[in-house]
Image (tube, coloured by chain):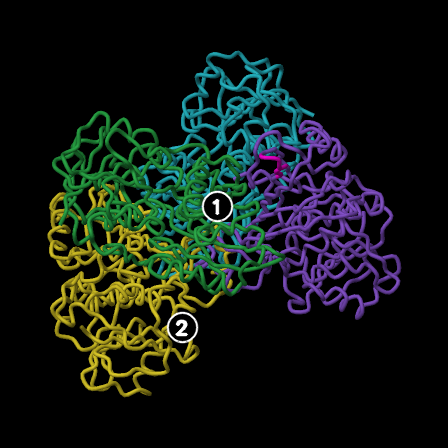
Chain colours: A green, B cyan, C yellow, D purple
Amino acid sequence: MINVSIAGGTGYTAGELLRILLHHPEVNIESVISTTSVGMSVSDIHRDLIGETDLVYSDTFKNPDVIFLCLGHGLSREFLEKNELPAGCKVIDLGNDFRNQPEFGNRKFVFGLCEQNREEIRKADNVANPGCFATTIMLALLPLASKNLLTEDIHIHAITGSTGAGKKPGETTHFSYRDNNISVYKPFTHQHLEEISNTLISAGNSNLPQINFVPMRGDFTRGIFASLYTKWNGTITDDEAIAYFKDYYADSPFVFVSDKPISLKEVVNTNKCLLHIEFHNGYIHITSISDNLVKGASGQAVQNMNLMFGFDESLGLKLKGSAF
Amino acid sequence: MINVSIAGGTGYTAGELLRILLHHPEVNIESVISTTSVGMSVSDIHRDLIGETDLVYSDTFKNPDVIFLCLGHGLSREFLEKNELPAGCKVIDLGNDFRNQPEFGNRKFVFGLCEQNREEIRKADNVANPGCFATTIMLALLPLASKNLLTEDIHIHAITGSTGAGKKPGETTHFSYRDNNISVYKPFTHQHLEEISNTLISAGNSNLPQINFVPMRGDFTRGIFASLYTKWNGTITDDEAIAYFKDYYADSPFVFVSDKPISLKEVVNTNKCLLHIEFHNGYIHITSISDNLVKGASGQAVQNMNLMFGFDESLGLKLKGSAF
Amino acid sequence: MINVSIAGGTGYTAGELLRILLHHPEVNIESVISTTSVGMSVSDIHRDLIGETDLVYSDTFKNPDVIFLCLGHGLSREFLEKNELPAGCKVIDLGNDFRNQPEFGNRKFVFGLCEQNREEIRKADNVANPGCFATTIMLALLPLASKNLLTEDIHIHAITGSTGAGKKPGETTHFSYRDNNISVYKPFTHQHLEEISNTLISAGNSNLPQINFVPMRGDFTRGIFASLYTKWNGTITDDEAIAYFKDYYADSPFVFVSDKPISLKEVVNTNKCLLHIEFHNGYIHITSISDNLVKGASGQAVQNMNLMFGFDESLGLKLKGSAF
Amino acid sequence: MINVSIAGGTGYTAGELLRILLHHPEVNIESVISTTSVGMSVSDIHRDLIGETDLVYSDTFKNPDVIFLCLGHGLSREFLEKNELPAGCKVIDLGNDFRNQPEFGNRKFVFGLCEQNREEIRKADNVANPGCFATTIMLALLPLASKNLLTEDIHIHAITGSTGAGKKPGETTHFSYRDNNISVYKPFTHQHLEEISNTLISAGNSNLPQINFVPMRGDFTRGIFASLYTKWNGTITDDEAIAYFKDYYADSPFVFVSDKPISLKEVVNTNKCLLHIEFHNGYIHITSISDNLVKGASGQAVQNMNLMFGFDESLGLKLKGSAF
């Protein structure tokens, strides 16, 4: 049993973390920190948690074994500067502060993509949890990168649910705008490109080609659907490629290759990432799906926690999917 | 051809008014007023109007024959106090300032429910356009009220689309909240109850019973679906009642009684209101549907304008429904 | 550890049962029966189960301790007539065959509303799982019925998600029809009225008033939102009533009274039922929400199973809600 | 005033055609043909047309000036083989029978992309109306093709609404499946590729590069959002390219280039196609949107009719967008 603290406890990723950790058999949530809601019930903010917790927001942690930082991007550094954590307290950052700049004082953050860095994470005290788009895309490309097979431009379109945009309401998350609507944002320039590139290079694809990534806003709440393809030079056969993907993820409890086409809701509300691979016109075409709040954020963070504390990697993460 | 001005030109009802009036054969839009967007293109705010207009926001009107007030509730009075309209300029208020308090200086507002007050509206210089819930509910009850048949409690549940809540984003219009969600608000206390009651009484139902109205937020953008019933004492037969409804609306170009059950999208993007009537367990049960932005707001406002200026009541309002 | 069989394994309720039981610590799924899909992988039909099970459809059971009947309404009787179950095999029927006609040969079905019949269910060999609308409505009325407080007409509108209509596609479950749409069906005549009435009477409300129930089709997939009210004669105070509701469900792990208004997604993907109570105009107004596939079907069935086998009532049912 | 007949009158494109033609000032609908619904009211099938028409389905045409074929793909040939049209009766086929095989007996079909073939269509007696995906994609590429600027692989992802899949319900149009879901179908092999290629070549791009097209099923009812890019070699500057697009469509009443990013609902329920162009990483990136039932089908068919009969190209097609 470990003591866990959550900083930034009112946002979407904190809510999802609570939904998971409240049923985790090895976790005691010792504190949920919020500067704006001290004294309020956690279930007054995350209304679906009624009946599941009596936790109340506090202004600081007590003596956690690990703290999850669910703060806005850029605010994790500030939090760590302002707050001295207890000796031995591990950190899992769900923001993007340390994904590409892992050094922070004495702390060195390991990039928390479990399927790539499992062994490093087991030994880590500080983990930078990957971004949601990045996770969904990296898991589709990692096996190819590990064989240095990414040699020509990679073409990616990926559609995200509205929860990826956070809790603060705005023009593009207004229901009247977003319902039955589709739009593109930050084409070719999304901030996750950097962690994707770093990861693929570190996986063994030293000369990475250009990655063309068009993110889209979908009219659904949860999930990322990525469709990506690149020229396929046939160094290995199509069947070998699929076999290699399956082999690559054989020990991963949450990544699976489907022989049939996939649809987004097959992973919603789970920590799974599903891949489907086809070959057309000299291209390898991969579809990849995950739940942006679970595998793309809080579920992956718990998966990292499980590794860091020597628990079974999937402990508390065998979630019932919503399917519909 | 008349000159039209629109005050409060950036909101949802103004946008819908523009969508209708830009194609109205007898209308020249002379000005679209906005205190916050002077000098901007109207199609920069109402993005779907690209290619349809070169109008630019101005800070005031020129010399309109009629001005539509699309201001927030309470702001119509303020606008009329601050701005002296040209002599003879008629006013159509889409807010709720004059629905229940029709006197304002020299101006006397006629309640703009065309199906009830057609003749008065033809002669009116000032019209208070009814609310969207109110319109959908009143049209379902008017024929009964006109015969003084409303004698026992009326039970109403009505579900509204998100555009009814306006453009400003908030917690209950956040896509992440509202998608696939349903909730109740202001049960038994909604502000439209007053105009509903006044209308039914003025229609002839002098001793109005209690109206129990539970408004609900739906996870769709356009439309109101009202389901309402009251005890049916059988003064007239079921068939006579249905025939009377049809007769009552025989001259109304936008209200129809369907012999089959109705679904909301049958009226979306039109100025129609559809009714369906059944009898069960000693109750008369009526379903009523309309598009809150068209028949419930801007379409009805144009219908009023048509009457006030002697145009055909349906001029510019034969809109292609979206159906899907 | 018990052996479980599921008959009718390709439908929605069977899929949901599998999602729950695959992670239930005391359950071994010994067979999933389908007459149409024998030999196929269960995850080829319930595609989201990829990576979670290698189960294959069979044409019959082996030696189960309990069999869940997820057959179409009317087909449970037929199944039991045609198949001789092993001695001691318990039955949980998710259809409506035995809810109102509990006798079947030697078998006598207990009505499986855990919150009412907990003790009987513990001793039962055959349980008739309640309907989804019925569950959501009965849980809102049970405390009042138990005090014989239902004396005047009860007015109910309840909106259901599309999964309630089952897997077979049809006109009113076509996405093009249903998206952004609302409609009424079977007003005042829904088949769940009988089990609701029987339950309320058996709970102690011997002279049940008329129940007026208008079911509606919502444009969402999961969940039922019920809004209901009845005259409130003030035998007990408002505060006493709320306190009594809380007290009535104090030992129920899944039913909670919220002091704040509720919205449907607070229970989606959980086995919870949330209630909220207000008083207006001489009425008590109750909103009640549940997930039709979980608390309204498969979750409640597992809750019944837990009671029947002496497990903790909530074992395997502490599900992460989807919230969004 | 012309007499119009519609064959295949119960499907989605026929319904949309009716919605448009019922308000067209130069059209008299003389017959709506259906083999399955003879004698039924048109508004019993297209329920939203209640109050707008008294048309009844017939089994054949009378003496039309033009007939619209809204039959399933492959059935237009069969219809023309079985039915001898009156002398001089023009044909507009909304299926795909004659798009790529324009010769049929004495009839020669002109490909009905108004923006490319305006003058030919004016003289045509037979027009093959383009497909919805094809229209949205061709309009994005035509200006480049006309300058022979398409030289390297074209990368396209396009998401379609459910109405594109037609009226017959099926697994992937089931609301429970499609709501909040995304999936890919027919990647790299969609049947519209042929008409797209033929059009771009005929427009002047003789050596067409490979077109990689990934179609996706969206969880909305109306519209196609296409995102496409190709290498940009800078033969002309970025500004020149945008200016050329605007110039190319200067005389087209329905195609506009937006200087700001676009979202799908800006064109829903209109006959418009909106384009937005950006340049990134050596690519020209174009987003293109249209309503699949209007500009992608029935609206474009009416636009063709207008040209064929010498009416103003936009007559009856200035539709109020739904915007929300």
Q: Are marks 1 and 2 on the same chain?
A: no
Residue A207 lies, with reference to residue B20, above or below; the image says: below
**Which quarter of the picture shows residue A84?**
top left
Quadrant for residue D288, please give it: top right
Q: Nearer the viewer, residue B37 or A183?
A: A183
Residue A310 in the image: state x and y as whole percent. 20, 52
Q: Main secondary structure of the magenta part?
A: strand
> In front here: B167 or A143?
A143
Quadrant, the N terminus of chain C: bottom left
Amino acid type of the residue tagged 1 in the rendering:
Ile
Q: Position of residue C56 (x, y in %)?
A: 37, 75
> What numbered label is drawn on residue C41?
2
* Residue D283 is one of the magenta-drawn residues: yes
Q: Chain of mark 2?
A: C
Residue D234 drawn above or below residue C164: above
Q: Secondary structure at mark 1?
A: strand
The residue stretch that appears in magenta: D281-286
Q: Mark on residue C136? A: none
Do the residues under discs 1 and 2 have CB atoms within 8 angstroms? Answer: no
Q: CA distance from mark 1 to mark 2?
A: 30 Å
Q: Is residue C245 left or right of residue D153?
A: left
- Magenta stretch holds residue D313: no
Residue that carries the numbered disc 1 in the rendered image = A159
Give the left or right position of residue C262, taking residue B105 as reference: left
Mark 2 is surrounded, within 10 Å at the Cα level, by few (under 14), some (14 to 19) or many (20 or more) other residues, namely: some
